[in-house]
Amino acid sequence: MSRASGADRGPLVVVGDVMLDVDLVGRAERLSPEVPVPVIVDADRRERPGGAALAALLAARSGARVILIAALADDDAARRISDLLAREVELIGLPWGGTTPVKTRVRAGDHAVTRLDSGGTAGVIGPVPTAAVTALRSAAAVLVADYGRGVAADPQVRELLTACAAAAPLVWDPHPRGPEPVPGARLVTPNETEAAQWGPSAGGSRSPDGPRPAAAGAAADGRRLRTRWSAGAVAVTLGARGALLVSGPGAPLAVPAPAVAGGDTCGAGDAFAAAATVALAAGQLPSEAVAAAVAEAAGFVAAGGAAGVEPADRRAAVEAPPAGAGPDPTNRASGRHAAEEPLTEVLARVRARGGRVVATGGCFDLLHAGHVATLEAARALGDCLVVCLNSDASIRRLKGPGRPLQNQADRVRLLAALRYVDAVTVFDEDVPNEVLRRVRPDLWVKGGDYTGAELPEATVLAEWSGEVVTLPYLAGRSTTSLVDQARG
């Protein structure tokens, strides 16, 4: 996601219900002798903003200035949410007499064992503060992240949102327990189940001849809901199958999702809605916004879902590059955002949940389709991909004074922008032995035809029982051939 520049562009405003999400993550090595349930040991407590607060945080991490307007209770959970958002999101609280919902997942590694809910009692929302009115009137785009707890149903809030829909892109992420979107929303984003639940009162979600194919059902529900809600477009999200965009009487637009192995879908709807809102705020069409949102949501799931979102107080600065290299957007938490997470934290996070670390290396001097194919295939072999990048000095020694074509900082930035890459680290040696010992990957991936050949890196990988695998290059793609073609 990227934010359009411009001094006259207002903030992205998120309106909705917030909650505190807690993960208790430990190990399950035995069953209890009293009852046949797993015993979770050494549980680590991890807190993060939930609901509309998660959507706001994800939008802010795209680079947007984000203001969150939400009902805030006078309790410890609300104060913790405020602390978790303080560095990245501006929070305007609506006076509220309820209690903050707290959802606690107990997990054994990556597997949820149970969920404990507390709080969430209803209350009356007080007068909307002047600061909230000002934020909404100046918004570049508005996202309503409704969790059915009263904010989106409040008459004062709805009146303001109706006015917003006429002035700026408004995205509404609905909830079955919540109200219908206000008329004029640019994009409404129900999931397939929600669209079907809304559908029957708009004419039913089944054809006279019985059940319909899933795509046909989603399209029919989307068309009905678009008319019913007077919305510009409805994007029915289909989970791993992507999304179906209905924006007129013609054929809907199917946006497939990239394949994701495993992952946690918790929070994927917030990631989708936040990405779509950021894209619309930047002036993109709904079709472009939905395509960006599908890709972002898939990346979010692959990176661990909501459980992979670290609050600001647990995020550190990016590792510094070698002297003179300039800014280094290297190591990333998800492979889908600007570099934010140090390499050591990427490795620790993946290994803490028993994941497999994959690494590959090279100059990546002129990024081309062959590189991308290799990186995509390498990432599919494990749970994170670290690219070990030759420094400028290393490339000059290997390839001569005319190389590299792009400096090290630019090469890092290009690689870091690829969704297959989780971290980039630069090494200055002619061979990657020392960087391999730092990363200690489970798999070291080489591109090219090395069939039957013994690779020198295998000796280093054997020190920690790592393995070397090879992937074929995409035929006809190479930096040298591209340079030769350009020179004519």
Image: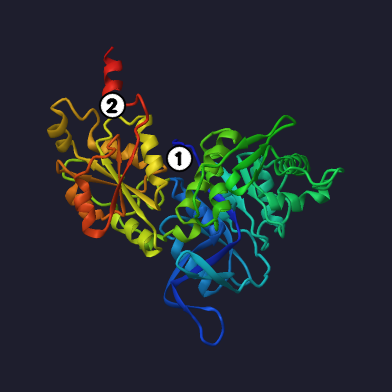
Asked if residue 124 is positioned above or below residue 382 in the image, the reply reads: below
Furthest residue toward top: 488
The residue type indicated by label 1 comes to: Ser
Q: Say what amino acid the circle numbered 2 marks.
A: Thr
Q: Local crowd at mark 1 within 10 Å, few (<14), some, or many (≥20)?
A: some
Q: Nearer the viewer, residue 143 or 352?
A: 352
On the picture, is 259 further left or further right than 484? right
Q: Which mark is residue 479?
A: 2
The image quarter containing residue 290 is: top right
The image position of residue 322, as x and y in percent, is 18, 45
Please name which of the two marks, 2 or 1, marks the residue nearer to the observer.
2
SS type, badge 1: loop
Residue 337 visible in this rendered orientation of the protein: no
Q: Quadrant of the C terminus?
A: top left
Instruction: Name the residue carrying label 1.
Output: 2
Does 118 appear above or below 483? below
Measured as percent of width and height from the top left, residue 425 is found at 26, 47
